[in-house]
Image (spheres, rainbow, N blue to C red):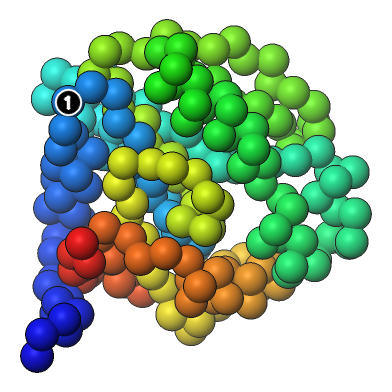
Amino acid sequence: MAGAMPSLQPISPDALVELVSDLATDGPGRRIVAVDGADAAEPVALATAVADHVEASGRAASVVAMADFLRPASLRLEFGHADAESYRTIWFDHAAVRREVVDALRSKGQWLPRLWDPVRDRSFRDGPRTAAIDQVLVLAGPMVRSSGLVVDATVALIMSEGALRRRTPEGDLWTIPALLEDACSAPAPDIEVRYDHPERPAFRRTS
């Protein structure tokens, strides 16, 4: 049938790292790739493996974790410590990521690796890093696709509600409704990965 969604294909974890690395380096110059996934999917771990693989091939690569760009507690907890809508719309400082990472990389050839330490609730005070001419940055964390950030490619680690509940700490279960709602409304990724069992993922290209 014309326009039908491609079938999911099984892939090994190592092959998935290679697949995402190929996507990240599919073009010259500085590139930004997003790995979108709930904390339960450990998107930063995959992003780190991808960055390591890209660097091993001779191209500069680094990871930017969305968890290092949270808003101050006074803002993100304004409506309580377990408000799902706040988690979806307020917690992450997408404006700062746009300004200090995405736009800075493209206009100044630099980026800020971290902004806000949620444990101490204060700035990390990191300085900007200088980007290589072929720098790859991998943005990793929850709900990146719906953030409005303009990146070169996206990968989505999709987990069912059951898998999210199995892999999310009890104290964070309140985030699941926001994650599920966001996954339904977010733009389609370039690569969709079904990640209920990270040791046995399956993927399909959607673009």
Image quadrant in which you'd find residue 87? bottom right
Residue at point 66%, 47% (across, down): 92
- Residue 148 vs 100, above or below: the answer is below
- Residue 178 placement (x, y as % from top left): 63, 71
User: Secondary structure under badge 1?
Assistant: loop
175 displayed left or right of 77 = left
- Residue 151 placement (x, y as % from top left): 38, 41
Residue at point 13%, 71% (across, down): 10
Q: Quadrant of the C terminus?
A: bottom left
- Residue 195 placement (x, y as % from top left): 33, 69
182 displayed left or right of 84 = left
Image quadrant in which you'd find residue 110? top left
In-front residue for pair 160/71: 71
In-front residue for pair 161/179: 179
- Residue 41 vs 127, above or below: the answer is below
Which residue is the site of mark 1?
28
Residue lying farthest bottom? 1
- Residue 49 vs 43, above or below: the answer is above
Residue at point 10%, 85% (across, down): 2
Q: Quadrant of the N terminus?
A: bottom left
- Residue 82 placement (x, y as % from top left): 80, 66
Q: In this rendering, does residue 56 appear at all? A: no
Q: In this rendering, does residue 78 appear at all? A: yes
Residue at point 50%, 73% (across, down): 185
- The amino acid type found where label 1 is placed reads Pro
